[in-house]
Amino acid sequence: MSDATSTTPACPPVTSPDLTTFARVDALGLRVDAQQIWPDKAILFCSLLTVDDRCPRCGAGGRVHDQVLRRFTHLPVGRRPTWLSVRVPRFRCDGCGRVWRHSLKTVARPRSKLTRAADWWALCQVVLDHTPISGVAAVLDVSWDTAHTAVTDVGTQLLIDHPGRLDGVEVVGVDEHAWRHTRKGDKYVTVIIDLTPIRDDTGPARLLDLVEGRSKKAFKTWLEAQTDQFRARVAIVAMDGFTGFKTAAAEAVPDATAVMDPFYAEVLVMTM
DNA sequence: CAGACCGGTAGCTAAGCTCT
DNA sequence: AGAGCTTAGCTACCGGTCTG
């Protein structure tokens, strides 16, 4: 039985084996033409599903000039990395003579070694499964920097820049954290978290932001950088005993109630 | 010791140019 | 027309160092 309100996905049809859809390269605008299975990796030789032969400069049609090979790292199968070897045509414009190659922006970020699907997989590994960057890099068979760049770029784009990220925040927690101990002294950041789920008993706290330094100015500047709606919705600001945070909250969100974090309140009672 | 960070650099990409 | 060369800019990789 099914109706329009049912959330059960429809049973997909049973089809013949198809490596293009199984390896999810169709979503990248590619088709798998051949495969090569090594003990430590799989290589899928791909071609483009569609090519745009219009000149980006004058709009006239172009002829195939030559072809270049691009290699990408794609979603792993189990713990075995998958490479895509993509044949990309270069065109020469019949009108202005310009030479250009077909854009691969549907396949990967500019100059990236990882496909967009691999970017997404890496981000999920780190954010949802708490896999270290080195673990993701090992499975993909890329360097730590490559995996780190992909996770931070896509994470910033999808999570940090998400317009609804601060929606529904009513209880803000603030604290300082020493993120690096050096011979020249410790470096601190101000940590800002959403404690609304804790108050409502609906889930864990959520990290909202990290700001360099630990000062009234750091916290106040962050609060003032948010929208009027955000500041109007904040009802409670929980903090340690640092008066700078309390002053910042009083000046930037005057209608909110400043409270001491239960952890610090407990420590205060124990030391009395 | 594992993981993260960082500076230097080799090698790659993209696009234009030249040669055959 | 097609293949190969050139070059600026960029990225991935490497190795050393730091941190917890």
Image (cartoon, coloured by chain):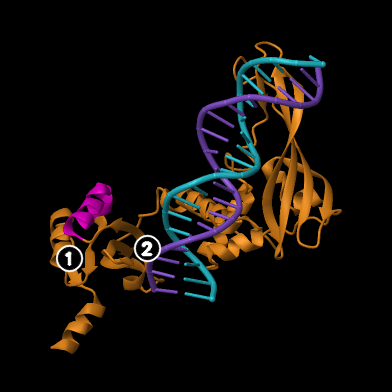
Chain colours: A orange, B cyan, C purple
Q: Position of residue A9 (x, y in %)?
A: 67, 59
Chain containing the residue with disc 1: A
- Residue situated furthest right in the rendering: A16
Q: Mark 1 highlights which residue? A: A257
Q: Is residue A93 above or below residue A134?
A: above
Magenta stretch? A215-232
Give the structural element (helix, strand or loop) at label 2.
strand
Image position, residue A243 (x, y; %): 13, 66
A230 left or right of A9 in image: left
Q: Hey, which residue is sitting farthest top in the picture?
A: A95
In this rendering, would A266 be left or right of A155?
A: left
Please report the residue visible at 17 percent of the width from the left and 67 percent of the height from the top.
A258
**Residue A216 magenta-highlighted:** yes
Is there any visible trace of residue A125 in the rendered image? yes
Q: Quadrant of residue A2?
A: bottom right
Q: Position of residue A147 (x, y in %)?
A: 56, 55
The chain holding disc 2 is A
> Badge 2: few (under 14), some or many (20 or more) residues near its Cα, within 10 Å?
few
Q: Amino acid at mark 1?
A: Thr
Whole-percent x and y of residue A111? 59, 40
Which-is-in-front pick, marks 1 and 2? Answer: 2
Q: For the image shown, how many numbered marks are present on the structure? A: 2
The kind of secondary structure element at disc 1 is: strand
Give yes or no for residue A267 being in the magenta stretch: no
Q: Which mark is residue A207?
A: 2
Which of the two residues, A260 or A216, is positioned nearer the viewer here? A216
**What secondary structure characterizes most of the magenta part?**
helix
Snapshot quadrant of residue A22? bottom right
The quadrant of the image that shows the N terminus of chain A is: bottom right
Rounded to the nearest angstrom, the CA distance separating label 1 from label 2 is 20 Å
Image point (23%, 69%), residue name: A238
